[in-house]
Image: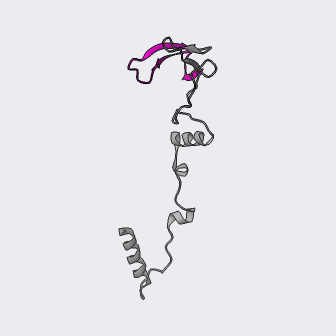
Amino acid sequence: MAGRLLLRAWTLRALQPGCIAAARPLHRAMSSLGGIPTDEDQATGLERRTLQALKQGKDPYSIQKPKHYAGTKEDPHIVPSIGNKRLVGCLCEEDNTAIVWFWLHEGDAQRCPSCGSHYKLVHHELPH
């Protein structure tokens, strides 16, 4: 609001007779560039790489909700890891308060010792 008032005061003063300043139309910087820049235009560094990967359909930092797996031998829960084993916690029932912890190793799908859900370790490279 204050910027508009200052802009109007300057243009009215420039249009008065006897004013040395030439009366020229004021152009805003954004209008010459084609509008307000988007987030993609302004992003730099890691944010830019993340936005580009999301545009290509990749999920570099596990930002999106994970895909739901059935947990069967044919469709096991996928567990990403940068090593050859990972500690996994399974909530066997929805209202269970105890977590069943077990080591998941590379190779075929392994079962939870309590409920029988299948988990498979998949090698995952860090994006950076």
* Of the pair 57 and 39, the residue shown nearer to us: 57
- Residue at the spot 59% in from the left edge and 21% down from the top edge: 76
- Residue at the spot 57% in from the left edge and 35% down from the top edge: 59
- Residue at the spot 42% in from the left edge and 84% down from the top edge: 19
Q: Is residue 24 above or below residue 74?
A: below
Quadrant containing the N terminus in the rendered view: bottom left
* Of the pair 35 and 122, the residue shown nearer to us: 122
Q: Is residue 9 above or below residue 107?
A: below
Range drawn in magenta:
76-104
Can residue 32 be seen here?
yes
Quadrant containing the C terminus in the rendered view: top right
Residue 50: % across, % down = 55, 39
- Based on the picture, tell me whether residue 62 belongs to the magenta stretch: no
Residue 114: % across, % down = 48, 12
Is 87 on the left-hand or right-hand side of 3? Answer: right
Is 101 on the left-hand or right-hand side of 119? Answer: left
- Based on the picture, tell me whether residue 95 belongs to the magenta stretch: yes
